[in-house]
């Protein structure tokens, strides 16, 4: 599962406490991460700090035996493009214990870079932050219970206004997969009044079906009112599609036109199944049923 898009969005918001702590200085601005080679290479995050240094941060959710060589490649390409040597760090966010080294030592070669398991990061710094992005990240850090921390954050999100609530909920649900707690969170969302209408919450599609069936049981006079209600429900189904597109963009980045068209063409009674795939599929094609 690719968590990079959601992590990058969270880490690049203004005044990110975790980035400032890792880099040792505030971020002045984010730089172009495309590094020209024979083929274009793209670093995860590259920032210019207030002290003038470059800070390169790679996000890793699994232990890769080639991490050191990748970091060396990035260092050379960044230096070539910007004429400066970056300070480099790998931030490990995976579930398994960190098993990568921050060094490459071979014949005639010695190269080092920073590496940190996010579980070593002081959760108190993130939990004390006024930014919901930091508090979402806290469940990945040095907390005793990622699930309890995520549930506390979910309750905060429930009190937020739209569209901020929708944005934060999508990020929380996606990143909770890194601690294998997203199924529990999804069940919790079903029980919480996060949305004013059922179809604003993609997990409550069944209420739409039940309400529609109940409306049909009314008489002819009520049928007119039902027609209006179904019109409103259709509008809420469109909101559900918008929410699905939003999660897809968080997981896989900007969507091609065909992917948006696929979501828009999904019948109302298949939206719940679509959302299940969107949250769990390893790639865009699988998420959309191809």
Image: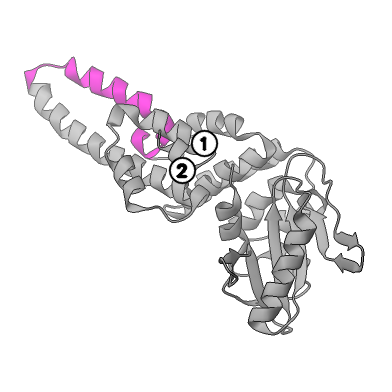
Kindly indicate the quadrant of the structure image that contains residue 214: top left
Which of 152/81 is in front? 81
Residue at x-position 69% and y-position 38% = 179
Q: Main secondary structure of the magenta part?
A: helix
> In this figure, which residue is indicated by the disc labeled 2?
284
Give the residue displayed 27% in from the left and 38% down from the top: 265
To which residue does mark 1 refer?
281
* Callout 2–callout 1 Cβ contact below 8 Å: yes
Q: Position of residue 106 (x, y in %)?
A: 90, 61
Question: CA gap, disc 2 to disc 1?
Answer: 7 Å
Vertical position of residue 11 compared to residue 281: above or below:
below
Task: Locate residue 277 relative to residue 86 in the image: left or right.
Answer: left
Q: Residue at x 65, y 82 (%)?
A: 82
Is residue 204 one of those drawn in magenta? yes
Residue 226: give x, y in percent of width and height: 16, 27
Q: Secondary structure at mark 1?
A: loop
Residue 45 in the image: x percent, y percent? Answer: 64, 66
Instruction: Point out the stretch of residues depicted in magenta.
Output: 196-220
Q: Which mark is residue 264?
A: none
Task: Report whether 267 appears left or right of 173.
Answer: left
Comparing 177 with 84, the one in front is 84
Label 2's element? Answer: helix
From the viewer's perspective, is residue 115 above or below residue 210?
below
Residue 11 can be seen, yes or no: yes
């Amino acid at each position: 599962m690719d968590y990079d898009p959601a992590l990058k969005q969270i880490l690049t918001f203004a005044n990110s406490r975790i980035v400032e702590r890792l880099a040792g200085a505030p971020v002045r601005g984010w730089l172009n991460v495309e590094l020209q080679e024979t083929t274009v290479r793209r670093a995860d995050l590259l920032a210019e700090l207030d002290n003038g240094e470059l800070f390169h941060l790679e996000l890793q959710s699994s232990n890769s035996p080639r991490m050191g060589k990748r970091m060396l490649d990035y260092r050379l390409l960044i230096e070539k493009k910007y004429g400066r040597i970056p300070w480099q760090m790998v931030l490990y966010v995976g579930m398994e214990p960190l098993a990568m080294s921050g060094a490459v030592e071979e014949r005639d070669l010695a190269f080092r870079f920073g590496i940190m398991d996010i579980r070593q990061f002081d959760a108190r710094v993130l939990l004390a932050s006024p930014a919901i992005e930091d508090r979402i990240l806290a469940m990945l850090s040095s907390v005793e219970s990622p699930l309890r921390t995520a549930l506390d954050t979910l309750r905060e999100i429930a009190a937020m206004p739209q569209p901020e609530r929708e944005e934060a909920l999508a990020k929380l649900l996606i990143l909770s997969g890194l601690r294998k707690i997203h199924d529990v969170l999804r069940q919790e969302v079903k029980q919480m009044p996060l949305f004013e209408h059922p179809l604003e919450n993609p997990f409550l599609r069944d209420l739409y079906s039940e309400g529609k069936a109940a409306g049909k049981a009314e008489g002819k006079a009520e049928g007119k009112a039902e027609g209006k209600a179904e019109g409103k429900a259709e509008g809420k189904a469109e909101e559900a599609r918008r929410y699905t597109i939003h999660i897809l963009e968080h997981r896989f980045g900007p969507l091609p036109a065909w992917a948006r068209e696929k979501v828009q063409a999904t019948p109302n009674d298949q939206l719940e199944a679509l959302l299940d795939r969107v949250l769990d599929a390893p790639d865009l094609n699988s998420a959309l049923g191809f």
